[in-house]
Amino acid sequence: MLAVLVLSVVFASFGLILGFASIRFKTVGDPLVDKIDALLPQIQCGQCQYPGCRPYALAIAKGEADIYQCPPGGDVCVKALADLLGLEAKPLHPDSGQEPLKRVAVIDEEKCIGCTLCIQACPVDAILGAPKFMHTVIASECTGCDLCLPPCPVDCISMEPVNEPCWTQAAAGLH
């Protein structure tokens, strides 16, 4: 019984210390970065030359990147970023590519060998499956970034177009 009491006191002490530390050493993010990140399409495709939307948002906030480098966001995203930052909207940068139509990955289940390489490559966890079992794509979660295509050893993944823009104001809550 004494051991239980001693352990309870030790754990309660650690809990108090951790609680104090979480309040005392709390880190606060940059609200501007959060606002910029919220306007980006969250595709994590890297077409902006940054590894994802959050690093791109951070670079925009620091003035290290321009607002017109996101092809999936297109002109709607550039305009929203310009409005937020008080800048002039520019056309999409030609080196970044064209604004794509939304596409989703489709796995040919007959060909899939269950290697899980596409699952590991997907930045938004839109692919489900287990080793040596057929995989499938959650179409509503797929951002169409194409990052699952290169690692597939049997080329069983294709990108199918969806008749809607890749990113819209409605998707970002900018009605």
Image: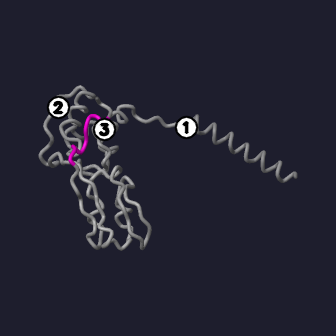
Q: Is residue 164 magenta?
A: yes
Badge 2 or badge 1: first in the primary sequence: 1
Disc 3 target residue: 171
**Front-most of residues 32 and 115:** 115
Give me the C-alpha separation between circle 3 and circle 2: 20 Å
Q: Magenta part of the protein: which range?
A: 163-172
Q: Position of residue 141 (x, y in %)?
A: 35, 50
Q: Element under label 3?
A: helix
| Disc 3: CA contacts within 10 A as few (<14), some (14-19) or many (>=20) | few
* Tag shown at residue 89: 2
* Residue linked to disc 1: 25
Question: Is 111 drawn above or below residue 56 in the view shown?
Answer: below
Indicate whether 165 appears above or below 1.
above
Residue 146 in the image: state x and y as whole percent.
26, 58
Amino acid at pointer 2: Ala
Q: How far apart, in angstroms, are the residues tagged by discs 3 and 1? A: 35 Å
The first of marks 3 and 2 along the sequence is 2
Give residue 43's mark.
Answer: none
Going by the numbered disc 1, the residue's amino acid type is Phe
Q: Residue at x 32, y 48 (%)?
A: 52
Identify the residue at horizontal 37%, vertical 59% (top origin): 127
Q: Residues within 10 Å of mark 1 (few under 14, many from 20)?
A: few
- Image quarter (top left, top right, bottom left or bottom right) of the C terminus: top left
**Residue situated furthest right in the rendering:** 1
Numbered disc 2: secondary structure:
loop
- Quadrant in the rendering for residue 116: bottom left
